[in-house]
């Protein structure tokens, strides 16, 4: 058995594999199975602002709603019937009682008041850390890149200033300058960054002539963009990186560690192969380390990060031109 220990958000993890935020993390039975299978940590499913509002409205109106759009309400209601804030707090408490691995809570809000309020509750319930899924998709043409950055940072700051547990930010990959954004988040006190979130996709049903949700799970081709940015960000910042999006096996996880990640998040591969697949991925990492004679994650972490490649920009440009003009 190889030493797969790594450090993330100040915790020593037994494995770099973290189960990313998703519905599989909604029950204590699944969480226990994740720990048994060798997950280094788990991120609970995000609690969305809409769920908090729904619970509040329900208690204020004793379940009789009059002034809400019925479809929106039905949707939110179904969402929080199984998974409102109360359930969430209980899940954190149960997870902390039952598990030894770090339990990271996740929040996805829009208004600052809810971010702060809920982060405080999460801390009180005993979560080891919190991941902020700040995923505004901006629709108007007036908002500038600077406005978005300011909003992002002030949201982060508002939460950070109100709790003591480590805060990580889960980012999307569509920023003008990802490395700068991460550096700013680090300067504001974030302990970790999750690269990357996979946003809700939009598709069209041509029979019904309707907009429909796109495919929710990732594919392996999502991985290469993460590799690039982990390699860049790990060279330019000191923040802990949990990398993910498109990880399908242990070898993919190794690639992200070579690029400089402290830990690797995995979700879609567990939906496809079951929770027990974590143990197979750990074994794949171990046998690769055996073959390459690495004794610890630390020995190969960041070996292929940008700072360890001579003139990375020229290298990328060269590969790009090669691919376009078809020179082998
Ligand atoms: C069914 C499903 C539910 C998810 N729910 C959440 C969520 O509540 N919060 C969140 O931050 N990410 C959520 N995600 C995104 C994952 O945490 C992860 O970032 C994304 O799937 C990319 O990782 P992967 O390639 O391993 O799937 C969800 C993903 C899936 C497939």
Image (cartoon, rainbow, N blue to C red):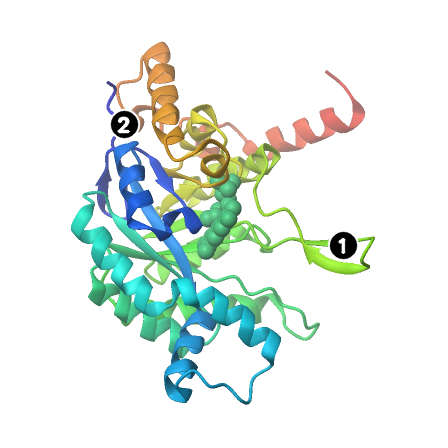
Quick check: 3 left or right of 180?
Answer: left
Q: Secondary structure at mark 2?
A: loop
Does the rendering let one see residue 128?
Answer: yes
x and y percentages locating residue 52 in the rendered image: 40, 73
Frontmost residue, 137 versus 310: 137
Residue at 42% x, 88% y is: 61
Residue at 27% x, 72% y is: 162
Residue at 39% x, 76% y is: 55
- Compared with 323, 34 (above or below) is below
Quick check: 272 left or right of 209?
Answer: left
Q: Secondary structure at mark 1?
A: strand
Q: For mark 2, what is the residue?
A: 4
Does the rendering let one see residue 179?
Answer: no
Residue 95 bears which disc, if any?
none
Q: Quadrant of the C terminus?
A: top right
Residue 295: name its quadrant.
top left
Residue at 63% x, 70% y is: 144
x and y percentages locating residue 284 in the rendered image: 39, 20
- Compared with 85, 172 (above or below) is above
| N-terminal-most mark, 1 or 2 | 2
Residue 156: name its quadrant.
bottom left
Question: Is mark 1 in CB contact (under 8 Å) with mark 2?
Answer: no
Q: For mark 1, what is the residue?
A: 204
């Amino acid at each position: 058995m190889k030493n797969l220990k790594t450090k993330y958000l100040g915790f020593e993890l037994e494995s770099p594999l973290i189960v990313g935020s998703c519905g599989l993390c909604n029950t204590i039975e699944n969480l226990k199975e994740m720990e048994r299978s060798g997950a280094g940590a788990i991120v609970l499913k995000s609690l969305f602002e809409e769920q908090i509002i729904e619970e509040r409205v329900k208690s204020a109106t004793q379940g009789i709603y009059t002034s809400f759009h019925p479809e929106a309400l039905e949707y939110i209601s179904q969402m929080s019937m199984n998974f409102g804030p109360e359930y969430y707090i209980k899940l954190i408490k149960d997870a902390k009682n039952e598990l030894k691995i770090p339990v990271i809570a996740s929040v996805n809000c829009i208004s600052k008041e809810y971010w702060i309020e809920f982060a405080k509750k999460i801390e009180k319930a005993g979560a080891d850390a919190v991941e902020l899924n700040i995923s505004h998709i901006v629709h108007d043409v007036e908002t500038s890149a600077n406005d978005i950055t300011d909003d992002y940072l002030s949201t982060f700051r508002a939460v950070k200033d109100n709790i003591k547990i480590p805060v990580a930010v889960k980012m999307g990959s569509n920023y003008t300058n990802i490395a700068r954004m991460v550096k700013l988040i680090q300067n504001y006190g974030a302990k970790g960054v999750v690269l990357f979130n996979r946003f809700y996709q939009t598709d069209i049903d041509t029979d019904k002539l309707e907009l429909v949700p796109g495919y929710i799970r990732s594919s392996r081709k999502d991985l290469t963009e993460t590799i690039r940015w982990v390699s860049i960000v790990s060279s330019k910042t000191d923040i802990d990186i949990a990398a993910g999006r498109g990880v399908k096996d242990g070898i993919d996880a190794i690639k992200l560690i070579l690029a400089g990640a402290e830990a690797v998040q995995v979700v879609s591969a567990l939906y496809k192969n079951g929770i027990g697949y974590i143990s197979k991925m750990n074994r794949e990492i171990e046998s690769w380390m055996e073959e390459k004679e690495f004794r610890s994650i630390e020995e190969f972490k960041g070996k292929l990060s940008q700072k360890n490649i001579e003139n990375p920009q020229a290298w990328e440009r060269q590969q790009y031109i090669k691919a376009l003009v078809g020179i082998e």
